[in-house]
Amino acid sequence: MSTKQKKKKTAVILFNLGGPDSKASIKPFLFNFFMDKNIIRAPIFIRYFLAKLISIRRSKREAGDSYKELGDKSPLLENSTAQAQALEKSLNKNNESEFKVFISMRYWHPMAEEVVKDVQEYEPDEIMLLPLYPQFSTTTTRSSFESWDKACKAIKLNVPTTRIGCYPWDAGYIKACAQNIVGVYNQAKSKTGKSLRILLSAHGLPEKIIAEGDPYQWQCEQSAEKIIEEFSNLTGIKNPDWQICYQSRVGPLQWIRPSTEEALQKAADDKVGVVILPHAFTQEHVETLVEIEIEYREEAEKMGLHEFYRVQTVGTSDMFIEGLKNLVLNNLGKNKTLSHTGKRLCAESFTDCHCVDV
């Protein structure tokens, strides 16, 4: 009698930023964020002082007010969990191998130190690291990878690991973004009788981080171009009116531009309505539900820009989840840091890019 062959087990780790789960956790969440050496690039004693100061101030002011709009907590874990469940279901459908999807948050629970223990108990044959950030940045993807490696080392978890470093023009992601825009754009055009400007808004970064070799801005621009190309394919609209912009500026440093506020002012000056998609975010959270939906909408009204339409992020879109599934299945056993194409996407001048060719 033949014995049944044991299924190969793969642990898929979805990385995300994390967010406070109560009013009391807003300050420690912010402290964890600003203590990251990838965020504030200063010696630890300076970083500690700044993180302490900023977290106290922002928890009482901007961040505290923003999370208050959401019941004093972030929906990021809930929304990431929905994506994890959808991906796990898709991976295990008609597949001879077994997949279990875990969520690892960078600045609030469940963080890497907790998740690695759950992964160790699962006893996987392979680990796949898959950030929910399509575009690579030292402040997001690299930071998550470093945190994961440190946590694995602490408990001696040593399993063959493949890392998806970026997927800025993966077909599933691009098509899901474009399809979401089409629905809102058509509805807005039908209501107003006018063509509108598409704003693709990404989280900003200080210019100095880009100057040090971070490819994030370039990858955001590439994503935006591919999304607009797909939008044109779906609608037949040639040369649609669009612009990329960057939101969420914090602190005194110069940040990459144009800012989302500047893009809104330009649309107001041009007397054209806007359809805005936060294309570098893959699920709803404070930057989309409060910063865009409430704060930027109010700013637009003050500017005289009354035609303002927000597009939902890709979330659990079938196309996006299918894209993530393909990223996992197509890269099993590679044991490298890869882009979605299997080749390095970034020019050599982007020295912080970690992806290699298969």
Image: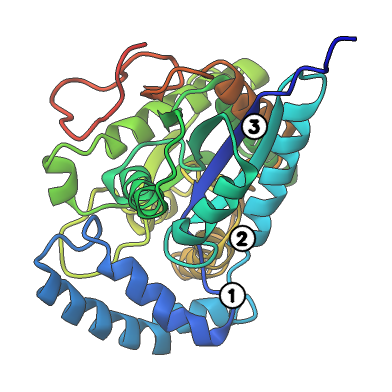
Is 207 placed above or below 226 here? below
Q: Residue furthest front?
A: 1
At 77% from the left and 28% from the top, the residue drawn is 92
Return the residue at label 1. Answer: 21
Real-space CA distance between mark 2 and mark 1, rounded to the nearest whole angstrom: 9 Å
Is residue 175 visible in the rendered structure shown here? no
At 61% from the left and 60% from the top, the residue drawn is 77
Residue 302 position in % (x across, y down) = 46, 71
Q: Quadrant of residue 57?
A: bottom left
Quadrant position of the N terminus in the picture: top right
Return the residue at label 2. Answer: 77
Residue type at the position of mark 3:
Phe
Real-space CA distance between mark 3 and mark 2, rounded to the nearest whole angstrom: 18 Å
Residue contact at pointers 2 and 1, CB within 8 angstroms: yes
Q: Quadrant of residue 106?
A: bottom left
Real-space CA distance between mark 1 and mark 3, rounded to the nearest whole angstrom: 26 Å
Q: Check disc 2 and report its element: helix, strand or loop.
A: helix
- Give whichever of discs 3 and 2 has the lower sequence position: 2
